[in-house]
Amino acid sequence: QVQLVEAGGGLVQAGGSLRLSCAASGRTFSSRAMGWFRQAPGKEREFVAAISSSGISTRYTDSVKGRFTISRDNAENTVYLQMNSLKPEDTAVYYCAASKYAIVITPRPSDFGSWGQGTQVTVSS
């Protein structure tokens, strides 16, 4: 089991940037793909971005392509989400998740076995 702790959320104006981090404990971090999901009030949890265990392969939901970048540092057991050009519709609780697999074929929440507690991101207009 991987324990995950997110940090870096906050309040930012539209057009601004935030960098989320997710620190993982456990020896299996480097063998797992990692993902970021988000959940806005009254909405279902949605996939945002994922990165393979090696860091070579990434994927994003269409609404964040070109604005968000996922990366990882396996030496530090940490995954990041750099968010630029933020929009009010990006407001949500952001969750870090560890996949059961080394790569993410389909970003289904059920493919992720460990979740962080979430960090709030609020973008004001």
Image (spheres, rainbow, N blue to C red):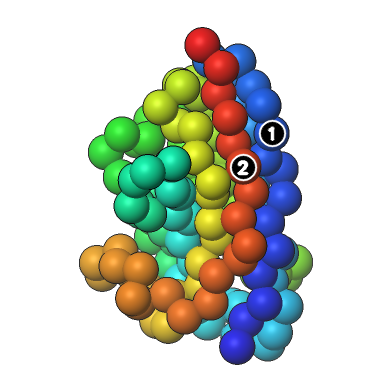
Q: Which residue is pictured at 55% across the width and 70% down the height? A: 115
Q: Which residue is pictured at 59% across the width and 77% down the height? A: 30
Label 2 crowding class (10 Å Cα cut-off): few <14, some 14-19, many 20+? some
Res 102 seen here: no
Q: Which residue is pictured at 68% across the width and 56% down the height? A: 6
Q: In which quarter of the image is the N terminus?
A: bottom right
Say which mark, if any, is on residue 10. Answer: 1
| In-image side of 115 versus 33 (left or right) | right
Res 46 seen here: yes
SS of the residue at dot 1?
strand
**Residue with the mark numbered 2:** 120
Q: What is the quadrant of residue 37 in the picture?
A: bottom left
Label 1 crowding class (10 Å Cα cut-off): few <14, some 14-19, many 20+? some
Q: What is the quadrant of residue 12 in the picture?
A: top right
**Front-lying residue, 32 or 119:** 119
**Front-lying residue, 27 or 75:** 27
Cα distance in 3D space between marks 2 and 1: 6 Å
SS of the residue at dot 2?
strand
As displayed, is residue 117 above or below residue 111? Answer: above
Say which mark, if any, is on residue 33. Answer: none
Q: Which residue is pictured at 42% across the width and 58% down the height? A: 50
Query: What amino acid is labelled 1 in the image?
Result: Gly
Residue ranking furthest to the front: 42
| In-image side of 122 versus 102 (left or right) | right
User: Residue 108 appears at what percent x and percent y?
Assistant: 29, 67
Answer yes or no: do the residues labelled 2 and 1 have beta carbons within 8 Å? Answer: yes
User: Residue 77 appears at what percent x and percent y?
Assistant: 70, 69
